[in-house]
Image: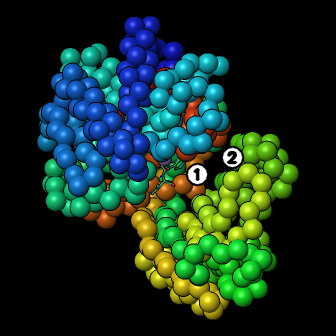
Amino acid sequence: MHQTNNTLPEDVWNNALEDFKTHLRFKSISTDSAYKQDVADCGAWLHAKFESMGLETQTYPTAGHPIVVGRTKADPNKKTVLIYGHYDVQPVDPLHLWHSDPFEPVIKDGKIWGRGTTDNKGQHLALILGVEKYLNEHEGELPVNVIFLIEGEEEIGSPNLKPFLEKHKEQFACDIIAVSDTGMVARNTPTLGYGLRGIACLEITVNAANADLHSGLYGGMVANPAQVVAKLISSLHDSNGKVAIDGFYDDVVELETWEKDMWTTVPDMDDTSLKTLLGVDELVGEAGYTPVERVWGRPTAEVNGIYGGYQGEGSKTVIPANAGAKLSFRLVPQMQPDIILAQAKAHLEQHCPAGVTLDIELGHSGNSYMCDPHSEFGKAGQEALRKTFNAEPVLIREGGSIPIIADFKEVLGTDSLLLGLALPDCQIHSPNENFHLANFRYGIVLVQNLLDELA
Ligand code: BES
Ligand code: MN
């Protein structure tokens, strides 16, 4: 008997919401060391949750934030499903744009608002609570072995998880991985992701004079680092929106025709809907591809931050001594992050004018991922989505990145089903992040259907 979306008893739902709010109140911002204890506390709460469900639970400290693992008693005759998620969240700035406290969840308009509601606490908690419900209704028995692996460093590139997996490979052997940390294209449109873009980050700093200078006394005599940063950034693209770094596209695998065709049928991903969603009157990017193709199947170069010079009120006539920018590249199969970073570094050095020094610091990176949505597991994922939402799933690739998914494939040899529940208006990484409560409920139901299908 499959579960439908209206089979949640009221007490289950109320308890689920209480757990959700508790989970959200931890300020588990992984990138900022000021929140190290909050991250640890959040992991400890998950640990206690797993124990309360009767799972074999362990928290593994790392050089950064802890990894929390909860597993059912392993039965060698059952398939094993690893469920991955992350309990760390992005920073909340700019705080003044939030309509309510990012760490004091508010329920309004059918959504729950706060940092991490969608990315990723709401999504992985729904899966945890669905498993809890299944256990409660079946005397602690599941049709498959389940291993929960919830980490605290996804938003900073999972630096410690891959080495951890390599060390504990046997303990995480599994048949399939289930992840709800990606998008759902529209309400009530179940979405199976079969690809993720990779990522490679770097930061540039440009230095010139030994101090900020009066721009009247010295302007026209020395290089201006802010202008150099602007020049370097504008050298990254040509007039067709292509990345102008030598060799950048060398390893890019072109989109397949079936994907392009399929994507034209995906709801709410047409130009008009996207313009409305994003509040722009033109969509721009690489010539020769639709917006969705550019985001799901093509590589890009982006500026994530830029600084230099005076930012305060009014004007200040100064030549800044230094300026900088944070860049990231999104990668598609078969691009290699290390190669891209080396090419980008060479490009920036070549384009850097005289009179300044350029420092390039390479940041974190991760591989792209792609699997076959029509495999046996892919079909099981589709069927679980179909039953849960009572609608035909769409198959997409994702523009975002979850680097550990490619590492799972490399280290464990296992593919991942990306069962996204994030709607386009959920504002992840942004002020007023929110999660549709309908999707929280769907997630609880989805995992139960998934376990049945996978078994
Ligand atoms: N959950 C997101 C990734 C995502 C969101 C994929 C929506 C597809 C649709 C994840 O938490 C994330 O933000 N990843 C980072 C990766 C990084 C910091 C290494 C990203 O994509 O920027
Ligand atoms: Mn994220």
Using a 10 Å C-alpha cutoff, classify the residue at mark 2 as few (fewer than 14 neighbours), some (14 to 19) or many (20 or more): some
> Which residue type carries mark 1?
Ile
Percent of width and height locating residue 226: 67, 73
Q: What SS does tag 1 mark?
A: strand
Q: Which residue: 33% across, 39% down?
A: 39
Q: Nearest the camera: 233 or 367?
A: 233
Residue 48 pos. (x, y %): 22, 26
Mark seen at residue 396? 1
* Three-letter amino acid code of the residue under disc 2: Val
Q: Is residue 378 left or right of residue 223?
A: left
Q: Which residue is mark 2?
A: 266
Alpha carbon distance from label 2 to label 1: 8 Å
Picture quarter with the N terminus:
top left
Q: Are marks 2 and 1 in contact (CB under 8 Å)?
A: yes
Of the image marks 2 and 1, the number of the one nearer the N terminus: 2
Report the label total: 2
In percent of width and height, residue 172 lies at 21, 50
